[in-house]
Image (cartoon, rainbow, N blue to C red):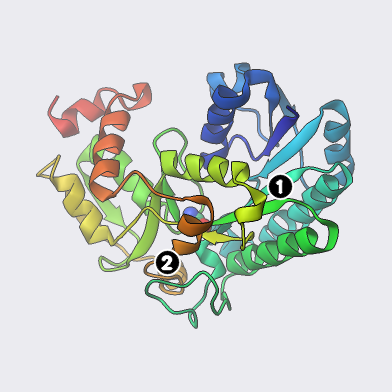
């Protein structure tokens, strides 16, 4: 089996994907790369790590020459809220970085995973049960870069036969590595604050409904899609996938079933609220279910229970965790 390259390996998805891929295919089969040094000891010591700047095509080629890469999971990206504050950087990394990776994948005959997002939809997209194939006119730079990514990945598949596949991720909830600069980050921060202080101030309005997914489902979705039989795939870039959808109020209520005194307040950030308002309330992921058997395992209740349990045991949250949860 050829090796797997992961870009953006130190980020929220990358840190957990690398560990899952190493468990599945072997430690030396997975080359973790990032422009940041991993602080996580497991990620750093469990297999090869290379500094890799996706904006440097020569650097990518050098890494491709050193290893025998067959698949690339290209996760290096800027998220939606940061993108709005630095549109130029969002375009550079999300579009030019992807282009450099696509070119290297074409040259070295690699399969490519590309993460798109609910951000690739916009105000004119049907909001409820958003279809797989529908209007996509995103109004954020993040959305524009993600839609560009979907299209260019499809183009490389049709034009050069590159085996590119992708998912439109909703907000991802995880306890290992916190996200940074996204609009859906509240759904992670709320758990840290619930454990530490038993209260949270949310930057989105109480009734803002968005799709979400727990990280174990997201990791499984990526691997299952990349392992799926190509003949079964009608779509490629990118499949709607979702695990659950909820509002901040509903998430707070789920946390209250474990911590009855938990309080939520609101201090709305107009930038992130506008981004969230332009995204679907819920996506139809039947194409993913039909074409490669997608099925989430975590709903709101299961995810909430697991997040609170895992975070309460996290060494960095010790002490304060016991105060909020009465243990
Ligand atoms: C963000 O909020 O920017 C991301 C996403 C939904 O793509 N989590």
Give the image location of residue 78, x and y in percent.
61, 53
Decide if residue 39 is in sight here: no
Q: Residue furthest bottom?
A: 124
The circle on residue 203 is: none
Looking at the image, residue 207 lies above or below residue 68: below
Q: Mark 2 or mark 1, which has the lower sequence index? A: 1
- Identify the residue position indicated by label 2 in the image: 284
Is 200 on the left or on the right of 213, as rendered? Answer: left
Residue at image point 62% right, 44% down = 226
Total marks shown come to 2
Give the image location of residue 309, x and y in percent.
26, 31
Residue at image point 37% right, 74% down = 128
Q: Quadrant location of residue 171? A: bottom left
Badge 2: few (under 14), some or many (20 or more) residues near its Cα, within 10 Å? some
Whether label 1 lies within 8 Å of ligand 1 gets the answer no
Badge 1: few (under 14), some or many (20 or more) residues near its Cα, within 10 Å? many
User: Between marks 2 and 1, how big is the CA–CA gap?
Assistant: 24 Å
The circle on residue 112 is: 1
Is 77 on the left or on the right of 23, as rendered? Answer: right
For the N terminus, the image quarter is top right
């Amino acid at each position: 089996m050829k090796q797997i390259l992961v870009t953006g390996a130190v980020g929220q998805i990358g840190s957990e994907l690398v560990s899952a891929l190493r468990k599945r295919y072997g430690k030396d089969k997975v080359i973790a790369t990032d422009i940041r040094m991993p602080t996580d000891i497991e990620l750093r010591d469990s297999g090869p790590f290379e500094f890799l700047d996706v904006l440097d095509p020569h650097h990518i080629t050098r890494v491709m020459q050193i290893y025998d890469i067959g698949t690339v999971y290209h996760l290096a990206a800027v998220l939606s809220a940061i993108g709005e504050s630095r549109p130029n950087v969002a375009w550079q990394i999300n579009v030019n970085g992807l282009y450099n990776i696509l070119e290297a994948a074409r040259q070295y005959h690699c399969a490519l995973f590309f993460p798109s997002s609910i951000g690739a939809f916009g105000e004119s997209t049907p909001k409820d049960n958003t279809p797989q194939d529908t209007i996509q006119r995103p109004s954020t730079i993040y959305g524009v870069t993600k839609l560009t990514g979907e299209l260019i990945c499809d183009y490389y598949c049709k034009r050069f036969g590159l085996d590119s596949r992708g998912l439109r991720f909703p907000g991802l909830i995880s306890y290992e590595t916190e996200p940074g600069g996204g609009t859906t980050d509240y759904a992670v921060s709320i758990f840290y604050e619930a454990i530490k202080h038993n209260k949270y101030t949310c930057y989105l309005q109480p009734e803002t409904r968005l799709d979400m997914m727990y990280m174990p489902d997201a990791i499984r979705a990526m691997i299952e899609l990349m392992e799926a039989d190509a003949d079964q795939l009608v779509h490629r870039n990118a499949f709607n996938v979702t695990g659950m959808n909820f509002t901040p109020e509903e998430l707070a209520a789920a946390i209250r079933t474990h911590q009855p005194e938990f309080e939520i307040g609101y201090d709305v950030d107009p930038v992130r609220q506008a981004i969230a308002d332009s995204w679907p309330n819920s996506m139809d992921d039947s194409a993913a279910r039909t074409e490669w058997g997608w099925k989430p395992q975590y709903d709101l209740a299961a995810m909430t229970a697991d997040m609170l349990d895992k975070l309460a045991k996290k060494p960095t949250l010790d002490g304060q965790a016991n105060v909020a949860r009465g243990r």
